[in-house]
Image: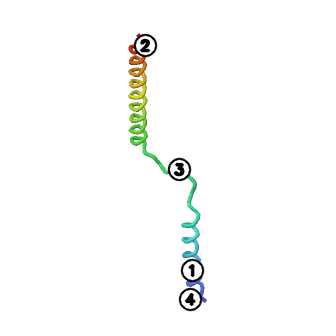
C-alpha cells in the first residue's frame, strides 16, 4: 500500500507542476523601486527633449514667416 501511495503522490506532484506551467499568472512582472525611478527619469528626459524640439520648430517657423 505504501509503494502505491508513494507512486501516486509522485505522479500527482508531476501533474501539478505541469499544470502550473500551462497556466501562467496574469500578474504583471515586479519592477523594483530603483528601476521605476530610472524609467521615470528617462521618460522625463524624453518629454523635455520633445518640448525643446517643438519650441525650436515653432521659432524656426516664425522666423521664416517674418
Q: CA distance from mark 3 to mark 2?
A: 51 Å
Query: Is residue 61 depicted above or below 31 in this figure?
Result: above
Residue under the point 42% across and 18% down: 61
**Which quadrant holds residue 55?**
top left
Secondary structure at numbered mark 2: helix
Q: Which residue does the numbered mark 4 point to in the structure image?
A: 3
User: How many numbered markers are drawn?
Assistant: 4
Of circles 3 and 1, which is in front?
3
Foreground pick, 28 / 52: 52
Position of residue 52 measured from the top left corner of the image (x, y, whole percent): 39, 24
Please tell me which residue lies in front, 22 or 20: 22
Which SS class for mark 3? loop
Q: Position of residue 1 (x, y in %)?
A: 61, 89
Relative to residue 4, is residue 36 drawn left or right? left
Choose the circle earlier in sequence order: 4 or 1: 4
Spatial separation of the CA atoms under disc 3 and disc 4 = 42 Å
Q: Which residue is mark 2?
A: 65
Q: Earlier in the sequence, mark 3 or mark 1?
A: 1
Q: Which part of the image, by quadrant, shows the C terminus?
A: top left
- From this view, report whether residue 39 is shown above or below residue 5: above
Q: Is residue 55 above or below residue 25?
A: above
Place residue 51 in its image quadrant: top left
Q: Which residue is mark 1?
A: 11
Give the spatial CA distance, label 1 vs label 2.
79 Å
What is the distance, in whole Å, between disc 3 and disc 1 at their CAs? 31 Å
The residue singled out by tag 3 in the image is: 28
Q: Residue at x 42, y 28 (%)?
A: 50
Quadrant position of residue 7: bottom right
Q: Looking at the image, is mark 3 or mark 4 earlier in the sequence?
A: 4
Tell whether label 2 touches label 3 (CB within 8 Å). Answer: no
Q: Are marks 3 and 4 in contact (CB under 8 Å)?
A: no
Q: Residue at x 56, y 52 (%)?
A: 27
Amino acid at each position: 500500500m505504501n509503494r502505491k501511495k508513494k507512486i501516486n503522490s509522485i505522479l500527482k506532484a508531476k501533474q501539478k507542476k505541469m499544470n502550473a506551467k500551462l497556466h501562467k499568472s496574469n500578474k504583471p512582472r515586479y519592477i523594483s523601486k530603483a528601476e521605476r525611478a530610472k524609467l521615470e527619469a528617462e521618460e522625463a528626459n524624453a518629454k523635455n527633449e520633445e518640448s525643446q524640439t517643438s519650441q525650436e520648430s515653432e521659432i524656426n517657423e516664425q522666423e521664416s514667416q517674418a
